[in-house]
Image: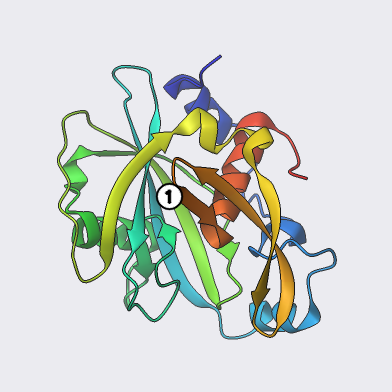
Protein backbone atom coordinates (compact mmCIF):
# COMPACT_ATOMS: atom_id res chain seq x y z
CA UNK A 1 0.00 0.00 0.00
CA UNK A 2 1.32 3.44 -0.92
CA UNK A 3 2.32 5.91 1.76
CA UNK A 4 -0.14 8.78 2.09
CA UNK A 5 0.55 12.42 3.01
CA UNK A 6 -1.37 11.92 6.25
CA UNK A 7 0.77 8.91 7.21
CA UNK A 8 3.88 11.02 6.72
CA UNK A 9 2.50 13.83 8.86
CA UNK A 10 1.58 11.37 11.60
CA UNK A 11 5.00 9.70 11.50
CA UNK A 12 6.75 13.00 12.13
CA UNK A 13 4.19 14.17 14.68
CA UNK A 14 4.91 11.03 16.73
CA UNK A 15 8.68 11.63 16.92
CA UNK A 16 9.74 12.31 20.52
CA UNK A 17 11.08 15.82 21.21
CA UNK A 18 14.80 16.03 20.55
CA UNK A 19 14.91 12.66 18.80
CA UNK A 20 18.51 11.88 17.90
CA UNK A 21 20.03 9.34 15.52
CA UNK A 22 22.00 6.42 16.85
CA UNK A 23 25.69 6.13 16.02
CA UNK A 24 24.89 3.82 13.12
CA UNK A 25 22.75 6.53 11.54
CA UNK A 26 25.08 9.49 11.84
CA UNK A 27 27.31 8.82 8.86
CA UNK A 28 27.01 7.36 5.39
CA UNK A 29 29.69 4.81 6.35
CA UNK A 30 27.85 1.80 7.74
CA UNK A 31 30.89 -0.13 8.96
CA UNK A 32 30.25 -1.58 12.40
CA UNK A 33 31.92 -0.15 14.34
CA UNK A 34 32.32 3.16 12.52
CA UNK A 35 36.06 3.60 11.84
CA UNK A 36 37.73 5.72 14.56
CA UNK A 37 39.19 8.25 12.10
CA UNK A 38 35.68 8.98 10.78
CA UNK A 39 34.24 9.21 14.29
CA UNK A 40 37.01 11.70 15.11
CA UNK A 41 35.97 13.90 12.17
CA UNK A 42 32.36 13.71 13.29
CA UNK A 43 33.26 15.01 16.74
CA UNK A 44 35.26 18.04 15.60
CA UNK A 45 34.76 20.87 13.15
CA UNK A 46 31.25 20.04 12.01
CA UNK A 47 29.87 22.58 9.56
CA UNK A 48 26.13 23.24 10.00
CA UNK A 49 24.11 22.57 6.86
CA UNK A 50 20.55 21.83 5.81
CA UNK A 51 18.81 20.10 2.93
CA UNK A 52 15.23 20.21 1.70
CA UNK A 53 13.62 16.85 0.90
CA UNK A 54 10.79 17.99 -1.43
CA UNK A 55 7.86 15.61 -1.90
CA UNK A 56 5.72 16.00 -5.01
CA UNK A 57 2.36 14.52 -6.03
CA UNK A 58 0.36 15.30 -2.90
CA UNK A 59 -2.86 16.00 -4.81
CA UNK A 60 -2.71 12.77 -6.81
CA UNK A 61 -1.56 10.70 -3.84
CA UNK A 62 1.34 9.27 -5.87
CA UNK A 63 4.15 10.73 -3.81
CA UNK A 64 7.54 11.29 -5.42
CA UNK A 65 10.73 12.65 -3.94
CA UNK A 66 12.72 15.26 -5.83
CA UNK A 67 16.49 14.81 -6.08
CA UNK A 68 19.32 16.47 -7.95
CA UNK A 69 22.60 15.35 -9.45
CA UNK A 70 25.40 17.69 -8.50
CA UNK A 71 27.79 18.98 -11.14
CA UNK A 72 31.18 17.32 -11.39
CA UNK A 73 33.30 20.34 -10.46
CA UNK A 74 31.88 21.03 -6.98
CA UNK A 75 34.22 20.78 -3.99
CA UNK A 76 31.99 18.54 -1.86
CA UNK A 77 30.08 15.47 -3.08
CA UNK A 78 30.74 16.30 -6.76
CA UNK A 79 28.59 14.35 -9.22
CA UNK A 80 26.56 12.68 -6.50
CA UNK A 81 22.80 12.44 -6.14
CA UNK A 82 21.65 14.83 -3.45
CA UNK A 83 18.85 16.97 -2.08
CA UNK A 84 18.88 20.75 -2.56
CA UNK A 85 20.86 22.20 0.30
CA UNK A 86 24.09 23.57 1.65
CA UNK A 87 25.82 25.31 4.51
CA UNK A 88 24.11 27.74 6.84
CA UNK A 89 24.96 31.41 6.51
CA UNK A 90 25.59 33.48 9.66
CA UNK A 91 22.32 34.08 11.49
CA UNK A 92 20.38 31.45 9.51
CA UNK A 93 18.50 28.55 11.01
CA UNK A 94 18.26 25.19 9.17
CA UNK A 95 14.78 25.88 7.77
CA UNK A 96 15.84 29.23 6.33
CA UNK A 97 18.96 27.69 4.81
CA UNK A 98 17.08 24.76 3.26
CA UNK A 99 14.51 27.07 1.64
CA UNK A 100 17.20 29.48 0.40
CA UNK A 101 19.32 26.71 -1.08
CA UNK A 102 16.31 25.11 -2.81
CA UNK A 103 15.44 28.49 -4.30
CA UNK A 104 19.00 29.03 -5.50
CA UNK A 105 19.69 25.50 -6.78
CA UNK A 106 16.39 24.48 -8.38
CA UNK A 107 14.34 27.69 -8.49
CA UNK A 108 11.77 26.42 -5.99
CA UNK A 109 9.40 29.16 -4.82
CA UNK A 110 9.18 28.90 -1.04
CA UNK A 111 5.51 29.94 -1.25
CA UNK A 112 4.85 26.52 -2.84
CA UNK A 113 6.42 24.63 0.09
CA UNK A 114 4.62 23.12 3.10
CA UNK A 115 7.09 22.09 5.79
CA UNK A 116 5.81 19.21 7.91
CA UNK A 117 8.86 17.66 9.52
CA UNK A 118 12.54 17.73 10.35
CA UNK A 119 14.65 14.62 10.74
CA UNK A 120 17.39 14.19 13.34
CA UNK A 121 20.62 15.84 12.24
CA UNK A 122 22.78 13.72 9.97
CA UNK A 123 26.56 13.89 10.34
CA UNK A 124 28.43 13.25 7.10
CA UNK A 125 31.90 11.81 6.87
CA UNK A 126 32.96 15.02 5.10
CA UNK A 127 32.30 17.06 8.22
CA UNK A 128 28.80 18.46 7.69
CA UNK A 129 26.12 18.45 10.39
CA UNK A 130 23.01 18.31 8.20
CA UNK A 131 19.43 19.11 9.20
CA UNK A 132 17.08 17.36 6.71
CA UNK A 133 13.83 19.36 6.30
CA UNK A 134 10.84 17.44 4.91
CA UNK A 135 8.24 19.28 2.83
CA UNK A 136 5.35 18.88 0.44
CA UNK A 137 5.51 20.93 -2.77
CA UNK A 138 2.40 22.25 -4.52
CA UNK A 139 1.39 20.57 -7.77
CA UNK A 140 2.28 22.32 -11.01
CA UNK A 141 5.45 23.98 -9.73
CA UNK A 142 8.24 24.34 -12.29
CA UNK A 143 11.93 24.05 -11.49
CA UNK A 144 14.97 25.83 -12.90
CA UNK A 145 18.34 24.25 -12.10
CA UNK A 146 21.38 26.39 -11.40
CA UNK A 147 23.83 25.07 -14.05
CA UNK A 148 26.76 25.85 -11.80
CA UNK A 149 25.59 23.41 -9.13
CA UNK A 150 22.91 21.13 -10.57
CA UNK A 151 23.46 18.84 -13.55
CA UNK A 152 19.98 17.26 -13.40
CA UNK A 153 16.70 17.43 -11.50
CA UNK A 154 14.61 14.26 -11.31
CA UNK A 155 12.06 12.61 -9.06
CA UNK A 156 11.47 9.04 -7.95
CA UNK A 157 8.63 7.20 -6.19
CA UNK A 158 8.79 7.78 -2.44
CA UNK A 159 7.51 4.25 -1.75
CA UNK A 160 10.48 2.81 -3.63
CA UNK A 161 13.11 5.08 -2.11
CA UNK A 162 12.21 4.26 1.49
CA UNK A 163 11.35 0.59 1.07
CA UNK A 164 13.88 -1.28 3.26
CA UNK A 165 14.08 -4.03 0.63
CA UNK A 166 15.60 -1.61 -1.89
CA UNK A 167 18.61 -0.61 0.19
CA UNK A 168 21.90 -2.32 -0.56
CA UNK A 169 25.09 -2.35 1.43
CA UNK A 170 28.01 -1.88 -0.94
CA UNK A 171 31.74 -1.32 -0.65
CA UNK A 172 33.77 1.63 -1.95
CA UNK A 173 37.33 2.84 -1.51
CA UNK A 174 36.87 5.99 0.58
CA UNK A 175 39.46 8.13 2.36
CA UNK A 176 42.21 5.56 2.14
CA UNK A 177 40.29 2.39 2.97
CA UNK A 178 37.47 0.15 1.81
CA UNK A 179 34.22 1.21 3.47
CA UNK A 180 30.65 -0.09 3.51
CA UNK A 181 27.90 2.25 2.34
CA UNK A 182 24.16 2.16 1.80
CA UNK A 183 22.95 2.58 -1.77
CA UNK A 184 19.55 2.77 -3.48
CA UNK A 185 19.89 2.32 -7.26
CA UNK A 186 16.91 3.65 -9.22
CA UNK A 187 16.32 3.91 -12.98
CA UNK A 188 19.92 4.54 -13.96
CA UNK A 189 20.65 6.72 -10.94
CA UNK A 190 23.01 5.50 -8.22
CA UNK A 191 21.92 7.02 -4.92
CA UNK A 192 24.51 6.40 -2.23
CA UNK A 193 26.42 8.01 0.62
CA UNK A 194 24.78 10.74 2.67
CA UNK A 195 21.65 10.87 0.50
CA UNK A 196 21.04 7.14 0.86
CA UNK A 197 21.72 7.49 4.58
CA UNK A 198 19.04 10.19 4.91
CA UNK A 199 16.61 8.03 2.96
CA UNK A 200 17.34 5.23 5.42
CA UNK A 201 16.56 7.61 8.29
CA UNK A 202 13.26 8.51 6.63
CA UNK A 203 12.51 4.82 6.16
CA UNK A 204 13.07 4.20 9.86
CA UNK A 205 10.74 7.03 10.80
CA UNK A 206 7.97 5.94 8.43
CA UNK A 207 8.29 2.15 8.74
CA UNK A 208 9.79 1.88 12.21
CA UNK A 209 12.39 -0.60 11.03
CA UNK A 210 16.14 -0.84 11.44
CA UNK A 211 18.07 -0.97 8.19
CA UNK A 212 20.38 -3.93 7.62
Image-quadrant location for residue 181:
bottom right
Q: Is residue 21 left or right of residue 145?
A: right
Query: Is 115 in front, or is 140?
Result: 140
What's the residue at 44%, 40% (across, down)? 187
Quadrant that contains the C terminus: top right
Image-quadrant location for residue 91:
bottom left
Q: Residue furthest right?
A: 33
Position of residue 71 measured from the top left corner of the image (x, y, whole percent): 31, 69
Residue neighbourhood size for the residue with mark 1, other residues' Cα within 10 Å, grouped as few (<14), some (14–19), many (≥20): many
Q: On screen, 177 above or below 137?
A: below
Q: Is residue 123 left or right of residue 117?
A: right
Q: Residue furthest top?
A: 1
What's the residue at 44%, 46% (across, down)? 188
Q: Which residue is mark 1?
A: 133
What's the residue at 80%, 80% (across, down)? 36
Query: Is 66 in front, or is 9?
Result: 66
Q: Is residue 36 left or right of residue 62?
A: right
Position of residue 125 measured from the top left corner of the image (x, y, whole percent): 61, 74
Position of residue 65 measured from the top left corner of the image (x, y, whole percent): 40, 38
Q: Is residue 164 among what the camera can see?
A: yes
Q: On screen, 163 above or below 102?
A: above
Q: Helix, strand or loop at disc 1?
A: strand
Way the structure is coloured: rainbow
Q: Is residue 84 among what the camera can see?
A: no
Q: On screen, 196 above or below 209?
A: below
Q: On screen, 208 above or below 42?
A: above
Quadrant that contains the N terminus: top right
For the image, the number of numbered tags is 1
What's the residue at 63%, 37% (across, down)? 166
Amino acid sequence: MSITPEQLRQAFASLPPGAAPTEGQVTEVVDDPVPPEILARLKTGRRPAAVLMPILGVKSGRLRLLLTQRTDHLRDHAGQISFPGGGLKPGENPLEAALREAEEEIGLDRAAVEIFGEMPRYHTGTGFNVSPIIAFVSDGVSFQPDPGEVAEIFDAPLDYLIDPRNFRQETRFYRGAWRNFLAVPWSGHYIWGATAGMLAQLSRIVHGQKMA
